[in-house]
Image (cartoon, grey):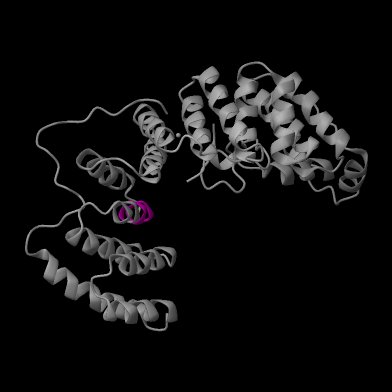
Amino acid sequence: MKRIAIAPAALLICSCAERTPTHAARPADVTKRPTGAVDTSMGRQVQNAIDAGEGDLAARRLRERMAASPNDAGLRLELAEHYRQRGQAELAVEHCRLVLDREPSNARAVLALSRALHQQGEPDRAAETVDQFLQKNPVSDAKLAAWLGYLRDDLGETAKAESAHRLAVSLAPGDAKLRNNLGYNLLEQGKVEDAISEFRKALELDMNLGVAHGNLATALMKAGDRQGALKHWQLATSDAAAAHNNAAVALMEEGRYAESRQELEAALGLKRNYLPAMRNLAILAERDGAPAALPAPVAARSAGQPSGKRGGVRKFWDFLIGASPAQPQAAQTNLGVRSE
C-alpha cells in the first residue's frame, strides 16, 4: 500500500520485518546530555533563539514571556513548537532538551522532542526517544503511544508498531482515529480480517471518519468484497466515479486487468472526462497492451492536435501518463490512511 497515493488530508492516517536489536551496551538516554553540557548549551541556544527570532514577532513575544517566567516549561515548549513549524527543528530540539534537563518525566516535552527529531530526518532517534521514556515512566498519554506506532510503521517495524498502536487504543478506547491507525498497521501486516474489524470499530465511533471508510474499502477489496469496497470508497470520497477508479487501481495492482478496465469504464461512464480514470486507463493500456478507448469528446480534441511523429492521440496518452522510462504508477483518489 502506497501511503502517498491514497492520502488526501490525513494527518494520521509502512514492510513487516522487525529489526533485531544488538545488545553490546545499553544505549545512552537520547533525551539527556552529558553532565556539564546544560549551562553551555543554555547560553548558546538562548543566543541562537535571539538570532533566529529577529523579525519573528511571535518568537519575540514568547521570549519576552519566558524572560518573565524562565522556569515555565509550557512557554519553552510553545516556543519549541513555533520553531518546529517554521522549519527550525534544531532550535526546537534544543528547547525541548532544556525542558527535559529540568523535568525528565515531562511527557509533553518528550513528544515535542521526538517530533522535532523526526522533522530533522532522524526517525530512529525519534522513536528511541519515546521508547526510552515509556520504559522509565508510567504510561498514561495515548498521544505518545500513538506517535510511537506512527514512527514504527514508517520505519517498517510493523510488529513493534502494532504493540504501540494497541497501547494507544487501550489508553483511549473511544478514539476512532487510533482504531483506524491500528487497523492500518494490521492491514500492512496482511492481517486483513483483523484490520476490517478495527476499521468497523472506528466507524462505529465516528461514521464520518473518511480515512477509515477508505481503509475499510481497501481491506474489503483484499478480502474479495468488491461491492462493499465500492460502497465505502464512495462514502470516503463522496464521488462514485472516484470509487470505481479506486477499485480499478486495486484490481490493476493484482494483475486483474480486464476487471480493472471495467471499473475504469464505469468511472468514465459517470464522468466522461474524469482525469484520474483517464490517466489510469492509459497506464492500463501500457501494461496489458489492449487499446484504451478515450471518451468521444476527448478523443476528438486530441485527434485535432498537431500529429508530430506519433500522432495527436499518442501525444495525448503520453501527457496522461507522463511518458518516462519508468513504469507509471496508477493512483487512487481522495483517500487517507493514518491520523497523527
Query: Residue at left 30%, top 80%?
Result: 50
Query: Residue at left 36%, top 44%?
Result: 141
Residue sitting farthest toward the top: 224
Q: Residue 138, position in %: x, y?
A: 25, 41
Which of 133 and 223 lies nearest the eye of the viewer?
133
The answer to whether one can see residue 294 in this image is no
Quarter of the picture containing the N terminus is top right
Is residue 115 magenta-colored?
yes
Q: Residue 160, position in %: x, y?
A: 34, 30
Is residue 13 magenta-colored?
no
Query: Residue at left 19%, top 74%?
Result: 44
In the displayed structure image, the side of residue 132 where residue 80 appears, left or right = right
Give the magenta range.
113-119
Mark count: 0
Q: Up-down: is 178 above or below 194?
A: below
Which of 143 and 123 lies nearest the eye of the viewer?
143
Taken as a whole, is the magenta stretch helix, strand or loop? helix
Q: Residue 273, position in %: x, y?
A: 84, 43
Q: Up-down: is 172 above or below 16?
A: below
Which of 10 and 197 lies nearest the eye of the viewer?
197
